[in-house]
Amino acid sequence: MNIAVSKPDLTIRLCGPRGFCAGVDRAIQIVVLALKAYGAPVYVRHEIVHNRYVVEGLEAKGAIFVEELDEIPAEHRAQPVVFSAHGVPKSVPADADARNLFYLDATCPLVSKVHKQAMRHNRLGRHVVLIGHAGHPEVIGTMGQLPEGTVSLIETVEDADVYEPVDPDNLGFVTQTTLSVDDTAGVIARLQERFPNLTAPAADSICYATTNRQEVVKEAAPGCDLFIVVGAPNSSNSKRLVEVALRAGAKKSVLVQRASEIDWDNIGDIETVGLSAGASAPEVIVNEIIEAFRARYNAVVELAETVKETENFLVNRELRSIELTTADMAFVNGE
């Protein structure tokens, strides 16, 4: 006789907003539309966004990812190449022009705004202080907007403590868009303490999506036995969400790319799980993780929502006449 084993009860606090921001959504749409408009292959310099699932989904449609433009074979130089959402140094479009390549820039408009803020500081004679993570593509892109030697990178409060500019009274700062709001505030406060004439950008550099995702995680995390953030290990904004969840009171917080990465054998006794996704993580994986919990628990999903995001960024002018269907984006958004 089969005896039914009852599943343990579980509450999943599903954060909203979560997942794709308008800039990521736009970048993926640009690659999908370019494939529809020009046919395969469409080349993409670097990961279009920091998510392996998204990259593999676009590869399946005919995108080819390269690290540098010289990897594009001569016979494909008439095909478009897309620059990633993180932005690129000025040298990259200049290189594309020199090679007679047709390129589509998928830089997030909010990253482009930071580029303009940095260039404005420079134009007004200020040395630019960039708060961000060394080696991140967005930081490389922002520093690459300005002449060498005109930007200094500050990563931590400790960096701010020892920074010695040539002209302490003539500084302007900008930040990477995907930083921890709280950590960045600490770095800025220390810089302002040391350099009272430090000029802020005309508008906050940390983007709305980063701020929104961190705020809802702060609300949802207290009382969670486990907090799961869907995202890639090289995704800055996703890693910040893990830190925010722990700081806000989650007993444990982990970053996973797929449900298969959850350590089911050592998950322990859990009653409440928080679930969010970084700005480059697709909704289909959030759904996959919810279903994986439902297979093991009597799971109830509660929505923890702070704001509704309505931002929408237009794709490049060359692509606006091409129809984008739900089916085109089902590989990341689900049906």
Image: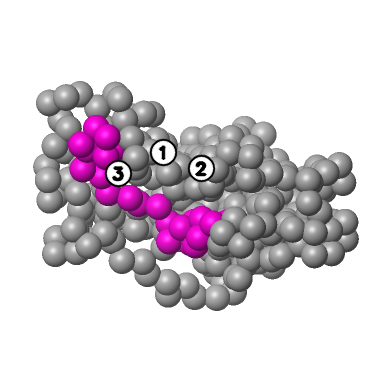
Point out the frontmost of discs 1 and 3.
1
Find residue 260 and report its horizontal and vertical position in percent.
49, 35
Question: Of helix, strand and loop, which one carries label 1?
Answer: helix
Kindly check if marks 1 and 3 are in contact, taking CB atoms under 8 A apart as contact: no
Kindly check if marks 2 and 1 are in contact, taking CB atoms under 8 A apart as contact: yes
Residue 328 magenta-highlighted: no
Find residue 27 and report its horizontal and vertical position in percent.
35, 52
Give the number of the disc on residue 91.
1
Which amino acid type is marked by label 3?
A: Val
**Residue at image coords 20%, 24%:** 73
Can residue 149 be seen from the camera position used here?
Answer: yes
Location of mark 3 (residue):
82
Give the number of the disc on residue 144.
2
Question: Of helix, strand and loop, which one carries label 2?
Answer: loop
User: What is the spatial separation of the Cα atoms under label 1 and label 3, in whole angstroms?
Assistant: 15 Å
User: What is the spatial separation of the Cα atoms under label 3 and label 2, in whole angstroms?
Assistant: 18 Å
Residue 99 magenta-highlighted: yes
Q: How is the image coloured?
A: one colour
Question: Of helix, strand and loop, which one carries label 3?
Answer: strand
Give the number of the disc on residue 43.
none
**Residue at image coords 43%, 61%:** 109
Q: Which residues are drawn in magenta?
A: 96-119
**Quarter of the view holding residue 76:** top left
User: What is the spatial separation of the Cα atoms under label 2 and label 1, in whole angstroms?
Assistant: 7 Å
Which amino acid type is marked by label 1?
A: Ser
**Residue at image coords 88%, 56%:** 194
Kindly check if marks 3 and 2 are in contact, taking CB atoms under 8 A apart as contact: no
Find residue 227 and report its horizontal and vertical position in percent.
65, 51
Q: Nearer the viewer, residue 257 or 11?
A: 257
**Quarter of the view holding residue 307:** bottom right
What quarter of the picture does the C terminus occupy? bottom left
